[in-house]
Structure formats: structure tokens, C-alpha cells
Amino acid sequence: MRLDVISIFPEYLAPLDLSLIGKARRDGLLDLHVHDLRDFAHDRHRTVDDSPYGGGAGMVMKAGPWSEAIDHVVTQGASALGEPAAVPTLVVPGPGGEPFTQQIARELADEPWLAFACGRYEGIDERVYEWAGERMPVRVLSLGDYVLNGGEVAVLAMVEAVARLLPGVIGNAESLVEESHEDGLLEYPVYTKPAEWDGRAVPEVLLGGNHRAIAAWRQEQRVQRTAARRPDLLPPAAAAAGLRELEER
Ligand code: 6GU
């Protein structure tokens, strides 16, 4: 998979050299390119922002540098892929986007080429979204209902969520299946040695070898935990039943 990231803080993406993502890059599974938006601003101060039409607080990112940067990414990427007509899916992280979920991570993991546009300040001139949308698929995606200073941290999260789904990135593919959000429930609690720690015992069922009993216990724990922490993930009746059971303990 090819990944391009455009940012005014390219150094913010340095963690993508580390851990599993760094290894995936060195193994040739991920071809990641980070671009400095300011390279596409042509005045002496390399200006990428200006005051908003209509007034208001903060600054808005200018359309010109963004269209040039995206054009550069498209041209360079298409040539590197040997497909002159190829375009990336453009992902624009922002608090006003569609919620980024495991389902969307799976969809993005099926794409051969993603480009991320990291906005800062009050956002990017709206005409960039229109212009890009006439040339490539565009997805505006949010990590959740809170505000970050820019898209860079969101890109770190999204790239990690997507890259770990690519074949070969995670050694043990089974660990991908039994995970929170893969089937709509949160993960069950896990324990390791010692069997007693701080006067706290590991649940008895896990110490015996009854695999059916263990699977049943884990599934019940997943429902309980989802009802307690994320009732929004359950059908209303299941959420209510799960909570009743919790209260009865
Ligand atoms: Cl994706 N970007 C920014 N700037 N803030 C956010 C976000 C994204 N998701 C939640 N808050």
C-alpha cells in the first residue's frame, strides 16, 4: 500500500518509523511518503494560511498550496505505481468528519493508495474539498467528539489502525480476529501468571482446561463489559439486560 501524508509539521509523523509500522515499511509492505505543505507556498514566508472571509477567530489554510501539494502527490504516486491514471483516496482528518471506525479502517485497508491531508488552524478552504472531490474519492474522518490541534495525531492513529490490517504486518493474524470492535463487542479481560497477585485470584474457569466453559465465560464478559462501557454498541434490549445482570452482582 502507498501512503502519502501532507502536513506543515512533517516531523510529527516521525513515529511512523517505529514498531510494527516501521517494520512494515522496511519489509516493503508500506510505501510511506511525507510531504511539507510549505514546499508548495511560493512567497518569501512560505505562507499557508490567511484570515477567514466573513470574519471570525483564527486562520484558514489557503487553497493554492493544498491543490499544488495534492497535485504533486497524485503525479508522483501515479508515476511510482506505473499507473498514469491512478488516484489516491484522499483522507482529511478533522473533528467535523464522519466517525473513524474499525469498519472504515477495513475499507481503507482495501485501497492500494491513501493520501492524508493534515489541516491545522480553523481548517482548509472549503473549495479544496470540492476541487479534490472532482478528481479523487475524498473522506473527511474524525477520531471522536473532541478537538485536536491538527490532523497529524489523527493520521498516526488512522495509519496504525489501517496498516495493522494489511497481510503480513501483524505476525499472528489470529490476534486480529479476537479484538474489540471486530465483531461489535469489546474484548474480554485477560490474565497471566501468577495465579494469585495482591490477594486477587484469576477467575477459576480460566485455570481449568474446559475450553467450552472458557469460551462461554469470555463471551459473557464481553457482553457485560460492552453493556457497562459502551451500551451504544448493543441493541437496546441487550444493553438493558446486561446492565441488570451487572446490578445483581
Ligand atoms: Cl481527525 N482532527 C482534528 N483536528 N481534531 C479531531 C479529530 C481529527 N478527531 C477528533 N478531533
Image (cartoon, grey):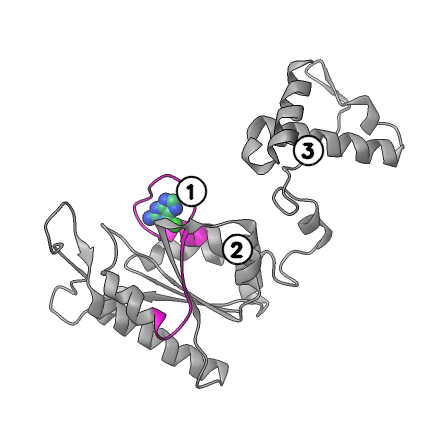
Left or right: where 103 falls relative to 148: right
Spatial distance from mark 2 to mark 3, Cα to Cα?
Answer: 22 Å
Depth order, front residue of 132/7: 132
For label 2, the SS is helix
Q: Is residue 162 visible?
A: yes
For label 3, the SS is helix
Q: Is residue 245 magenta?
A: no
Mark seen at residue 222: 3
Contact, mark 1 vs mark 2 (Cβ under 8 Å): no
Label 2 belongs to which residue? 104
Q: Mark 2: which amino acid?
A: Ile
Q: Is the CB–ligand 1 distance for label 1 below 8 Å?
A: yes
Q: Which residues are magenta?
A: 133-156
Mark seen at residue 144: 1
**Quadrant location of the N terminus in the rendered image:** bottom right
Q: Is residue 140 magenta?
A: yes
Q: Is residue 189 visible?
A: no
x 35%, y 52%: residue = 151
Contact, mark 2 vs mark 3 (Cβ under 8 Å): no
Q: Quadrant of residue 189?
A: top right
